[in-house]
Image: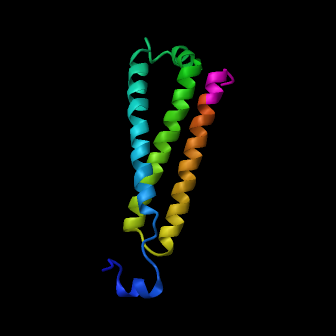
Amino acid sequence: MSLQSPLGRFLGHGSAKEGAHHWWMQRVSALALIPLTLWFVWAIAGIEDLQDQAAVVAWMSGAFNGIALILLIIAVTYHSMLGVQVVVEDYVHGATKVITMIILQLAHIVLSVAGIYSVIIISLGAG
């Protein structure tokens, strides 16, 4: 007994087979965000004066902090992109869906690159 519809059996098409990978990537990115977010909160709390730009720049200039911030930016934007994609796939239809997906993915890429660039520039002292 098959769980496919008669039309699906006739056409030989089943599921798109991408849902499981997407689901796993959402979970993996969420797991990566747990230690990164805990580190970020702990590290920010350890800065003496958050109002002092020099103190924050000095904190970001540390190799570990700069790398961890870049990893946090990547994980947050990737996790966000996956979540927004699910919402668009479920609630937006037609040509609007494709256009919305392209715009949202480009926006996530731009935000990610801008964040990484900012951390690198500040860490190297060029800002």
Comparing 73 with 13, the one in front is 13
Residue 27 in the image, given as x and y percentages of width and height: 39, 47
Residue 116, picture quadrant: top right
Q: Residue furthest top?
A: 48
Comparing 17 with 88, the one in front is 17
**Which residue corresponds to the image point at 47% horizontal and 86% vertical from the top-left?**
11
Residue 8, picture quadrant: bottom left
The answer to whether residue 101 is above or below residue 67 is below
Q: Quadrant of the N terminus?
A: bottom left
Q: Is residue 125 magenta?
A: yes
Number of numbered callouts drawn? 0
Q: The magenta stretch spans which residues?
A: 120-127
Q: Is residue 1 visible?
A: yes
The answer to whether residue 20 is above or below residue 125 is below
The majority secondary structure of the magenta stretch comes to: helix
- Report the side of 90 relative to 96 (left or right): left
Comparing 111 with 1, the one in front is 1
**Which residue corresponds to the image point at 44% horizontal and 18% vertical from the top-left?**
50
The answer to whether residue 103 is above or below residue 122 is below
Residue 78 in the image, given as x and y percentages of width and height: 49, 46
Residue 118 in the image, given as x and y percentages of width and height: 60, 32
Q: Is residue 66 magenta?
A: no
Residue 109 in the image, given as x and y percentages of width and height: 57, 48
- Report the side of 83 relative to 116 (left or right): left
**Which residue corresponds to the image point at 41% horizontal and 15% vertical from the top-left?**
46
Q: Is residue 84 visible?
A: no
Q: How is the image coloured?
A: rainbow
